[in-house]
Image (spheres, rainbow, N blue to C red):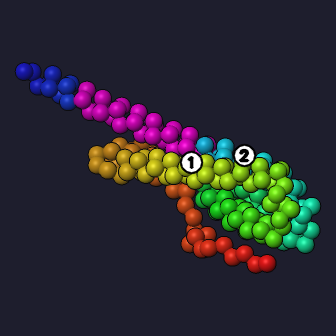
C-alpha cells in the first residue's frame, strides 16, 4: 500500500475523530444549558406563586412581618441572580424561608383551613419537588459533560477547542443546616 494512502487514511480518521468529539461535546454543552433552563423555568414558576402566597398569608399573620419580609427578600435575590452559583444560593435561601413560612402557619388554624392557602402551598410544594428534580438532572448532565472533557483523549481536544468545566448547582455549607423556626 502506498504511504501517501496510509497518511491520508490516518489524517481522515483523526479528522473524523475530532468531528465526532466536537459534536458530542457540543451536544452535552447544549444539554447542560437546557437543564439549567429547566431549573430557571421552575424558579420563575415559584417566584410567580410567591406574591399570591404572601398576600393570602398577610391577612392572617399581621404580626409575622419578619417572616414575610424574608420571603420577599429571598424572592428578590433570585430575580437578581445572574449565574449558576448566585441562582443556587438564592434558590436555597428561598426554599429555607418558605419552610419557615409554612412552619409558622401552624399557629394559624384559620389560615391552614383556607382553600387559597392550601392550594398555593400544594403548588409551591410541587414546584419545590420539580426544582429538586431539575437540579439533580442538571448536575447529572454537568457531571457527564465535565467527565467527558476531563478524560483522555477528549481532554486534549476539549482544551484545544476551549471547552471549560461547568459548575454544579449545589448548596453551600451554611445552606445545608436545618431551618430554625421561632414562634
Q: Residue at x 51, y 38 (%)?
A: 30
* 33 relative to 8, above or below: below
Q: Residue at x 46, y 46 (%)?
A: 141
Residue 86: percent from left, percent from top: 65, 59
* 157 relative to 173, above or below: above
Q: Which residues are magenta?
A: 12-37
* Circle 1 SS class: helix
> How many residues crowd mark 2 within 10 Å: few (<14), some (14–19), many (20+)?
some
- Taking depth in this image into account, of 64 and 166 the one nearest to the observer is 64
Q: How many marks?
A: 2
Give whichever of discs 2 and 1 has the lower sequence position: 2
- Taking depth in this image into account, of 145 and 139 the one nearest to the observer is 139
157 on left or right of 136? left
22 on left or right of 54? left
Residue 7 within the magenta-colored segment of the rendering: no
The image quarter containing residue 4 is top left
Please give the label number shown on residue 45.
Answer: 2
Residue topped by disc 1: 134
Residue 28 within the magenta-colored segment of the rendering: yes
Residue 135: percent from left, percent from top: 55, 52
Residue 2: percent from left, percent from top: 9, 21
Q: How much space separates mark 2 and mark 1, taking CA atoms?
A: 13 Å
Evaluate whether residue 80 shows in this view: no
Amino acid at each position: 500500500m502506498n504511504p501517501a494512502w496510509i497518511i491520508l487514511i490516518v489524517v481522515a480518521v483523526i479528522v473524523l475523530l475530532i468531528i465526532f468529539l466536537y459534536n458530542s461535546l457540543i451536544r452535552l454543552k447544549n444539554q447542560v444549558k437546557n437543564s439549567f433552563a429547566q431549573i430557571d423555568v421552575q424558579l420563575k414558576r415559584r417566584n410567580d406563586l410567591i406574591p399570591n402566597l404572601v398576600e393570602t398569608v398577610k391577612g392572617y399573620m399581621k404580626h409575622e412581618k419578619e417572616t414575610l419580609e424574608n420571603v420577599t427578600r429571598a424572592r428578590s435575590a433570585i430575580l437578581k441572580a445572574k449565574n449558576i452559583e448566585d441562582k443556587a444560593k438564592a434558590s436555597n435561601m428561598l426554599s429555607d424561608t418558605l419552610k419557615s413560612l409554612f412552619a409558622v402557619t401552624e399557629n394559624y388554624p384559620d389560615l391552614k383551613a383556607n382553600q387559597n392557602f392550601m392550594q398555593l402551598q400544594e403548588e409551591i410544594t410541587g414546584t419545590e419537588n420539580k426544582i429538586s428534580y431539575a437540579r439533580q438532572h442538571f448536575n447529572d448532565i454537568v457531571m457527564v459533560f465535565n467527565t467527558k472533557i476531563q478524560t483522555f483523549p477528549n481532554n486534549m481536544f476539549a482544551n484545544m477547542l476551549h471547552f471549560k468545566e461547568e459548575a454544579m448547582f449545589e448548596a453551600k455549607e451554611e445552606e445545608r443546616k436545618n431551618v430554625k423556626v421561632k414562634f
